[in-house]
Amino acid sequence: MFKTKIAGIGSFLPEKVLTNHDLEKMVDTSHDWIVQRTGIERRHVIAEGEGTSDMIVRAAQKALKDANMKAEDLDLILVATLSGDYKMPATSCIVQSKLGARNVMAFDLNAACSGFLYSVIVADQFIRTGFYKNILVVGAESLTRMLDYKDRDTCILFGDGAGAFILTRAEEKETNVILTGHARAEGQHAELLWAEAGGTKVPFSQAVLDNKSHFMKMKGKEIFKNATRTMAACCKEALESTNTSPEQIDWIVPHQANLRITEAVADQFKFPLSKVISTVHETGNTSAASIPIAFDMAVADGRIQRGQLILLTAFGAGLTAGSVLLRY
Ligand code: UT7
């Protein structure tokens, strides 16, 4: 069996920004409420006329450059998203063409906000077995296109962006590798966070548009409780399966949904908050994109360094959750 290392990283946030003060003019909310309850100050919004694939290409090109690779070097393109360009075909196919990659396998994976970690775990298996060598794994979302800007329960939380890792086969003696990954799903809670209509069960109709049932709906309090429970469980699995103690972790990079959720998870393991990467104030919740964006920002500002032990953890609609422990 081979091992997997991160060869390059990159991210992209659109230029347009939506602040809490902008939202005050759209729904009954306030900057202070949003900051106190979530930590979010602003979020980025995809440019008019662009799709998720356009953000992915920019993030992927940065990651390829960081890895000193070309698009032709890729053996697999894996895109984690719930807000792809089209219902069909997969956004990963659009990305394959736009990047100028070979006609390699390309597929999308929908595990909502846990999608990036699910995808890293899948890519890691392909590399471990020797089936593929160089894999582009992306988390990307255009969630602002799926929100009802009259629903303050959801519209204050989410933003757009893309983040990419290039994963590759490590040399035998290399120790900066992915150590373990754990993921789960609890479909009995699907209705806590969903976009009910627009799929095959409730197809598009005038009634759907009138009821706005194609927009995302959320039971925030329940999601909050389940988020802390499932992320903590996945982190525990990662630590126990590798005999790692919380004190050995240099950084935890959690899904960026709500600062209070992050703090509750950190508290369970007695991780000091100084070891928790938080970018939610700048990005809001970018679902599958949030972990690779936060990781890239923390590498860019010098917090995350090569050789450090990093714990990634996420939760999302499904409900899904996951963790990945790696040495960067
Ligand atoms: O990737 C997964 C995505 N989902 C999540 O991460 C969501 C997880 N849940 C949360 O982050 C939190 O539950 C929220 C931020 C959504 C809400 O925070 P909360 O502390 O659970 O607030 P709440 O729903 O208990 O509401 C508290 C008060 C209520 O008023 P009263 O009854 O105390 O008078 C709400 O009506 O705040 C009010 N409220 C708002 N006020 C201003 C609810 N939403 C808003 C709002 N602006 N947007």
Image (spheres, rainbow, N blue to C red):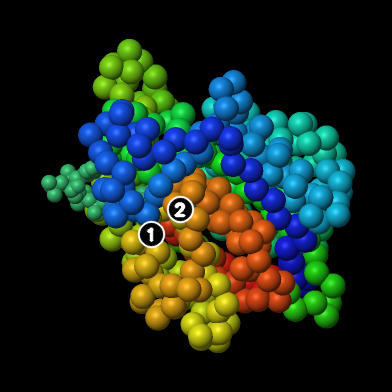
In the figure, 157 relative to 231: above or below? above
Residue at image mark 1: 259
**Residue 48 image point, x, y percent:** 56, 22
Residue drawn at x 52%, y 44% as measured from the top left: 110
Residue 198 spot, x, y in % from top left: 41, 26
Q: Indicate the position of residue 65 as horizontal and vertical percent values.
A: 81, 50
Give the amino acid type for the residue marked by disc 1 in the picture: Leu
Task: Identify the mark at residue 20; answer none if there is no mark.
Answer: none
Please provide percent x and percent y for residue 249. Answer: 55, 79
Residue drawn at x 71%, y 76% is 307
Query: Would residue 187 be visible to someone looking at this image?
Result: no
Picture disc at residue 280: 2
Q: Is residue 261 above or below residue 71?
A: below
**Earlier along the polypeptide chain: callout 2 or callout 1?**
1
Q: Look at the numbered discs 2 and 1 and tell me whether their residues touch, using CB distance below 8 Å.
A: yes
Q: Residue at x 55, y 48 (%)?
A: 289
